[in-house]
Amino acid sequence: MKKINMKSLIITSIVCLLPIICGLIFYNELPESIAIHWGIDNNPDGYFSKPAFVYGMPIMMVALQVFCCIVSDLSDKNPEANKKATTVYKWIIPIITVVLYIVTIAIALGNNLDIRKIVMILLGILFIISGNYMPKVRNDYYMTSKIFWVKNRDEKLVNKAVKISAYSLIIFGILFILSILFKPVVSATILVAMILFCLIIYLYVYLKSRK
C-alpha cells in the first residue's frame, strides 16, 4: 500500500504558514486593502483585505501544498528512484509562498519594489531547477507519463516528451531572468511563448500516442 510522506508534508506545510508571523509583526502598519496581484506593468489589479491576506493566503497555499504532496506520494510508483526530484518539487510551493508573501508585505508598507523582476527571477530559478531534475524522474512517475495522457504507456514517446520539456524549462527559465533587463512587454511575450510551446508539445504527444 502506498504511503504518504507525512514528515515532508508537515514540514513543507509549516513553512507555508511561517510568513503569518511576518504579517502579524507588521499587522498594525499594513493598509486595510493589500494588493496581491499586479499587471505586467507593475500596476496592482487585485486586492485582498488585510485579514484575508495575512491569514488566508498562507492557509490557501497550505491546502494546495497538502493536495500536491498527497497526489505526488500516492501516484509515485518509484518513490526511492524519484526521491530527490520529488523533494525538489515539494518545496516549490513553500518557497513561492514565503518569497511572495514577504515581497507583498514590503510593497504594502510603501517599499518601491519591481514585482515583475522579482517574479521573473523567482520563476526563472524554479524553472531551471525543475528542468534539471525532470529527466531524472522515472517515466512511470505521475509527472511524466500521466501528465501527457500517453496511451499504452509508450516509454519512448514519454522519454522524448520529458527531454524536450526539461530543456524547454531551462531555456525559458534563463529567458525569464534575462527579460528583467528589458521592458515589461518582453517578459509578457516570453511567458505567452512558453504557454504556447507547452500546449504544442502536449498536443503533439497526446495525438502521437493515439496513432
Image: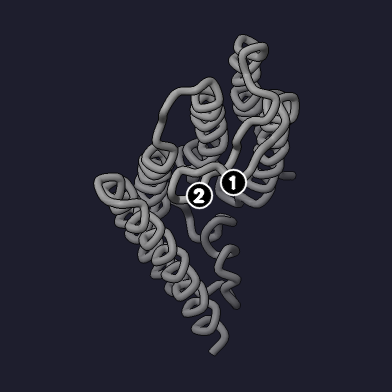
Q: Is residue 150 above or below residue 166?
A: below
User: Could you say which disc has been placed on residue 45 in the image?
Assistant: 1
Query: Decide: marks 2, 1 in contact (CB < 8 A)?
Result: yes
For image coordinates 36% across by 66% down, the residue present is 164
Q: Is residue 146 left or right of residue 126?
A: right
User: Could you say which disc has been placed on residue 39 in the image?
Assistant: 2
Amino acid, disc 1: Asp
Q: Position of residue 47 (x, y in %)?
A: 66, 38
Q: Is residue 123 left or right of residue 211?
A: left
Amino acid, disc 2: Gly
Q: Position of residue 170 (x, y in %)?
A: 32, 53
Q: Position of residue 141 (x, y in %)?
A: 55, 55
For image coordinates 60% across by 64% down, the residue present is 146
Tell me which numbered mark, 2 or 1, is placed earlier along the sequence. Answer: 2
Q: Assign a secondary structure to mark 2.
A: loop
Q: Is residue 129 visible?
A: no
Residue 110 or residue 211, whichever sits in front: 110
Q: Is residue 172 visible?
A: yes
